[in-house]
Image: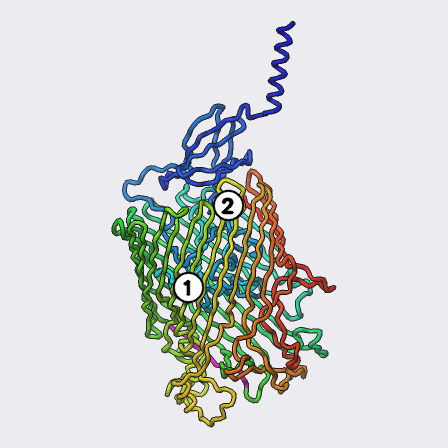
Amino acid sequence: MKSAKLKLNNRILFGIFLFCFGSPLFAVSIRAKLINPKKEIAEKNLSVLIFETKKFAQTDAEGNVTLDFPSAGDYTLRLLRDTGIQEIKISVGSEDESRTIYTEKKTSAPKTGIVVEGEREKTVSSRTKVRYEEIKRMPGTFGEALRALETLPGVIPNIGFGGGANGIIVRGANPNANTYLYDDLPILYPFHLDGLTSVIHNDLIKSIDLYSGAYPANFNNATGGIIEIETVDSVQKTKGAFQVSLWNTTAYAATPTSGGKGYLAIAGKLGYLDKTLGATGLLPEGIRLPRYNDSQIKYVHNFTPEHQISFYNLTAQDNFAIDVPNKPANDPTSSALALLSGARASFGQSFRTTALRYTWIPGDKFQNRITLINFDPIGEYNVGFGSIQGKQYQRGSYVGVRQDAYWTAARFLKVDFGTEVRKFSFRDYGTEVALRDPTNPSPNPYNSASPDFVGRPISIQGNSPYYNAYTTLHFKFGNFLFEPGARYDYIQVTGNGALTPRATASYTFPEVGKGMTVYGSGGDVSRFPLTTNFNSETGNPDLRFERARKVSAGIDQKIDQVWQVKVEMFKNQFTDTIIDDPYVSSPVGLNPDKGQWLTQPIVANRPLNYSNRATGWSHGYELLIRKNARPGTRDWFGWISYTWSQSFQNTNLYQIYEGDNSQIGGIERKILAAYFPNSKEQLAPWDRTHVANFIYGWRMSEGFQIGGRWSYLTSVPSRPVVGDDGGKFSNPLNGLTYWNPQYSNNPYTSEYGYVKRGTDFHRFDIRFDIFENYSWGYMNWYLEIVNVYMRKNKNGYDFDNSRPFSATNPKQNDTFGTLELPGGTVIPFFNIGMEVHF
């Protein structure tokens, strides 16, 4: 009896043990080492998710990790890489064990050659890198990873509809002076006309590098910054995604090809903002919001470990239109566009980039890349508004071949070098609209007696070769790195070129924290003129390259595995900047009006319209405090960026100031303008002294993520309005008076130039993400709220031409960030959508 009771008690205790501890009694641990056999390296510091248990683990510096499973069976490991998620299926036995897990198919060693993969070392000076997973769900970007550029140090957003990445200002340079590259291929513009949506699908982006200083010599054609978009470089399995939001739908698909020897990735986007927001009645009548679409194709095939080909085809197309109706009753107090009745305008832009790239890697010391490129950008507009009547079509395509090589010449020396040949084919026709006097601060569109705007007939077609070559030497002695380089660019149609040397030096103290690097860089960069500027009929064929001299120095301190602090100072000098110039001319030239060629083919003092007179400079300092998510955890991440800067510009054009009553003829005025420019240096109209961003993100669980972003910007400077012209002109269609603003023309007064700043800009954005995980992938529902506390942010001053100058005209201009419903209720701007990955 006692024995039976004892057995019963033992069973009860065993049952209680099972109840309390459950399946861990049968848990299995695997001590694994993750190896990439193609790269022959351990998968270090890699986050691993066991999908069935939703538990994370993290490999160490040697690729080792301990994985715990509740029982024997088949499991799915998800490797969380910067480029996306990779899945591996494994079978788990009933006993603990140690094993090696290969993250790709193991291949036999090649008979000749060595596979070289991974990123080349990049300069630390004036370069900021952000990875896809850090920026995809950043609040205030509407899910567009590329718009995270707004939050980086040295960047001033060009605030407007949708934010700023369509025209960011990099260290005081003109917003049009940046170059955007996609795997080192050109794209005409990074964002569609709505300012909200990029022309590159998120799932193709691996990382983005912003070069804001004297960038490496392999880049060109920017006096501002270089934005290098790197795309995914491997596809392990067939996958796809689509996303639906209030203003666009996107789709993406990728699959391995040829038994894993290559891959194909296709993505696209269709915008319909005119069908959603445009159909709400919140916009003035006559405005048709932008329509757009884009597509990207990338195909890669590896014939052998030494030979690879890549094919790219990128497209984007945008258009926008306005046609203001002329109604019998026009009340400017109730209709924002009443004064513009009868105005019409349409604008379109597009580009196509097609490239075939061959990469040869004969060993671990040398690789060469040859790229055939066809770039086809198009821009067109049609406008009719008072005396402004113009229609122009521009196409400046080129076909080129480019070669880039990387050679490890010695243990202490690596060499980059390359060349490129292009053949430009430009076509420009129509009627170009221009100011008769570019120095006129307040031109009147209804001045028909002596129009302030003129139309220049254009019909240009031609070809021109373009050549460049570059080299960079990378000397490394211990912890010291010195990288001198030089580049030369030449355009035959203008007959001039630009030699731009540059260099970077850095020294790393590995014993300070996790490493402290002190660095500095300096050198020249250049940008070539546009077709319209240098054409021989309405432009100046002697235009030179725009240039900038950039100098910077800083410290990059890695405190531990996740914390980083970076401080950098800079100064830029801009010279030979191209501007509209009413005084530059040729003593004798062809009559720009081809209709008079039979009667007067040759004219004296033929206007050239453009010159390299403008100059400018900027200086400042930047601070970046960054915290990455701790590997293998759901730790928070984010950064603080702050930029203090000042930007100045000078047209170096002759000005007629208040009180100058001298009687000087046209020829004498041109001589004075050529030899005695008297314009004053002023703040650049895009200058913002302080720019700060606070970014925060936290993946609270497998099913929920929250993020916040607070931005602060000093207001841009404006020219104070000191009066009006008395209402001399009116819209002939409805008789409404057009009041033209007047500005101070006395450089010795406090109201001269860009000196008036308005209210500073700041806003708080927040985003909520909900994830539903399935065996085939996941769904992501998101809500993004812009300007949570509904601040009425301003951006400069706006003069209402339907009213005379007064204490309330001009007033500060409202900018993007809130929506006003028909009843007058103001709500934050928001976006809601759903994204599916499979």
Cα gap from disc 2 to disc 1, whole angstroms: 30 Å
Nearest the eye: 326 or 676: 676
Q: Position of residue 260 (x, y in %)?
A: 41, 42
Q: Position of residue 151 (x, y in %)?
A: 51, 58
Q: Residue furthest bottom?
A: 663
Q: Is residue 467 visible?
A: no
Q: Is residue 621 above or below residue 310?
A: below
Q: Position of residue 513 (x, y in %)?
A: 41, 47
Please, what secondary structure does the residue beneath circle 1 have?
Answer: strand
The three-letter code of the residue at mark 2 reads: Ala
Nearest the eye: 128 or 86: 128
Q: Residue furthest right?
A: 823
Q: Which residue carries the number 2 mark?
A: 629
Which stretch appears magenta? 451-462
The three-letter code of the residue at mark 1 reads: Phe
Q: Which residue carries the number 1 mark?
A: 570
Asked if marks 2 and 1 touch (Cβ < 8 Å), the reply is no
Which SS type dominates the magenta stretch? strand
Q: Residue furthest left?
A: 410
Residue at 61 percent of width and 57 percent of height? 786
